[in-house]
Amino acid sequence: MPDPIRVLTSRVALFDADDVDTDQIFPAQFLKVTERKGLSKYLFYRWRYDEAGNPLGSFILDVEGFRDSKILLTGRNFGIGSSRENAVWALTEFGIRCVISSSFGDIFYNNASKNGLLCVRLGDDAADAMRNSVREGKLVVSVDLEKQTISYPGNQFAFEIEPHIKERLLRGADDIAFTINNYEEEIRGYEARMPKYMLPFRP
Amino acid sequence: MAFESLRVSGRRVRRPDLTFAVMDHNVPTGDRSVPVSEALSANQMLTLQKNTNEYGITLFDLQSPMQGISHVIGPELGLTLPGLTFTCGDSHSSTHGALGSLALGIGTSEGEHVFATQTIWLRRLKQFAVNLRGVLSECVTSKDVILSIIRTIGTGGAIGHVVEFRGPTVAKMSLEERMTMTNMTIEGGARTSIIEPDQKVFDYIRDGPFAPRGRDWDEAMEFWRTLGSDHEARYDRSLDVDVDPIEPQVSWGTNPAMTVGVTESVPSLGDFHDAGDRLAAEKALKYMGLLPNQRISDIPIDAVFIGSCTNARLSDLIAAARVLKGRRVSSSIRAMVVPGSQSVKRRAESLGLHRLFTEAGFEWRNSGCSMCIAMNEDKLSPGERCASTSNRNFENRQGPGGRTHLVSPLTAAAAAIEGRFVDVRDYGVASVEELGLEGAVVA
Ligand code: SF4
């Protein structure tokens, strides 16, 4: 079960690229690893390593002072493409707990919410302002999930989040237990009503 | 990994009878009588075998005659039905929406939730109507339509929406043509997509081994016929597309929105007004080894891949065959056909298509995802340039350093012959009748 999130305070790492798909976050060639641990070494692999597999050291998360950043600020449309949850696991194992972008791929967004990774959708203007502040100096921000705010000296932005996702992240909750404890009756009722023609034919 | 986590928490699969598994992403497409040579893939397949065994789930493994890409076999086997809610751990699950099912691509944690509860949490999706009107030009396909739509709306254009394709042009399309569009809506950011089911859908699934039979079939039909969209339905967004002017499309960049018509040129950097877009285009051109303003028809290619859940159904192979009949692949080109399922492969072979392909110089392989994702041995080498009927042209998607141009099966076949992109509209393409496919049912 993921650790709950309330307030995250960290230096912001800026990865200023739009349309970062999950292939870039976690390349397909590593999908065959059947363990869930150790995935962070493949995070942003092609941004961080050369063709021979040697670290380039230039990617923001490898730069001194940003290795421990918990907050990643990115361009538009982060996490589009393939549904691979490995992208989320690699980020969280690396230590990222919050990604800020003006929009996210839908499946990535869902996957993140199940793994204690907060995705903050920030309007383009606010995101631009924040990007500029990061470029000007080393920016430390506080993300307060309870209050739904991002703040740093001289600035505060509010953000929207779906109530059930907020709840889940705040409590680090086990979704399955929640569903079973609250909806078992309904599920059973539905199953009893399901017409036979909706079930796969079995000889 | 969803199984592993289920086991750790002591949970079971609630409805193994409603759960199916297939090996598709990493399977070899060569000789299936020899052991899988790649250790990681072999291990992954073995793990799936053990897990499905333990939980009592039907598995279509490498040897199964029903094996194929999940989005090809679902409709083929009568597993995907109108009105059904369908989930699969793959983003292109939207494909199944062409049958009028609510089809959702999910991640591993959501998959585990489905295993354990047979339900999924979903916030209400916004609705996006794409109304298609007009008549497609000869040799322009639904692949060209969806590529041009993604070019219009962008890769994030439909985020948070379910895209519904509507209108007279959709009604005229075959189910397989519709599936090519629902398959790729995900590349426009859509959560999924849907089309109202009609008789073509019912005919397609009728003989599937898992489709309802007898009285159940009649009852199902009664229900399915109620699933049309309301005429006065309101949508959060809509887009009207006149398909008449659409020409064959070719992607030039590293996401599917970076696409132009075959008679156009690669854009010039001055075409991009947004600084971010310009930077992305510059980066894409560098990766693709292309110059601004280069004409699409001047781009030489090295490889052709006809396959994937977008364009590897029987009608796609027939379309490519129409171009290939009586012609030979350019000597500098490596070309392969990977049927979307073993059933597609068998049906194609019964029509003699495998001979037509191999005589033209194509490799004829077993089914799987293959060079769409390059998780098996089928991959491009660095710098190699491929005309591909798949759906993603991301960097390294078809192999490290590989360069992908997304096209329709017709355009891919013509490119194989010429060694570069040509306008297939004036290329002299045989009609289906001229192919002489005895008893062919073009779905
Ligand atoms: S064919 Fe390609 S896009 Fe389709 S399921 Fe396989 S890997 Fe994914």
Image (spheres, coloured by chain):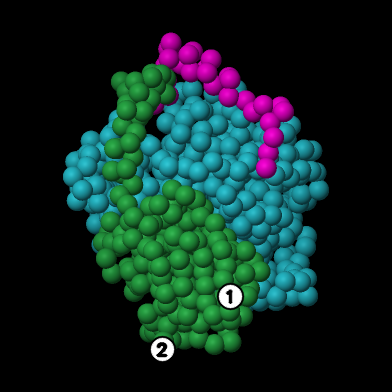
Chain colours: A green, B cyan
Looking at the picture, tell me which residue is in the foreground, B437 or A147. Answer: A147
Left of B34 or right of it: where is B275? Answer: right
Residue that mark 1 sits on: A155
Residue that mark 2 sits on: A64
Question: Mark 1 is on which residue type?
Answer: Asn
Earlier sequence position, callout 1 versus callout 2: 2
The image quarter containing residue B227 is top right
Give coordinates of residue B78: x percent, y percent: 44, 28
Q: Which residue is drawn at 73% across and 39% down?
A: B132
Residue B289 belongs to the span the image colors magenta:
no
Q: Is mark 2 within 8 Å of ligand 1?
A: no
Disc 2 secondary structure class: loop
- For this orientation, the residue located farthest to the top is B215
Position above or below: B33 against B272: above
Give coordinates of residue A127: x percent, y percent: 60, 70
Quarter of the figure that contains the C terminus of chain B: top right
Letter of the chain that mark 1 sits on in the rendering: A
The region drawn magenta spans: B209-236
Residue B386 seen anywhere in this rendered image of the structure: no
3D distance between C-alphas at marks 1 and 2: 26 Å
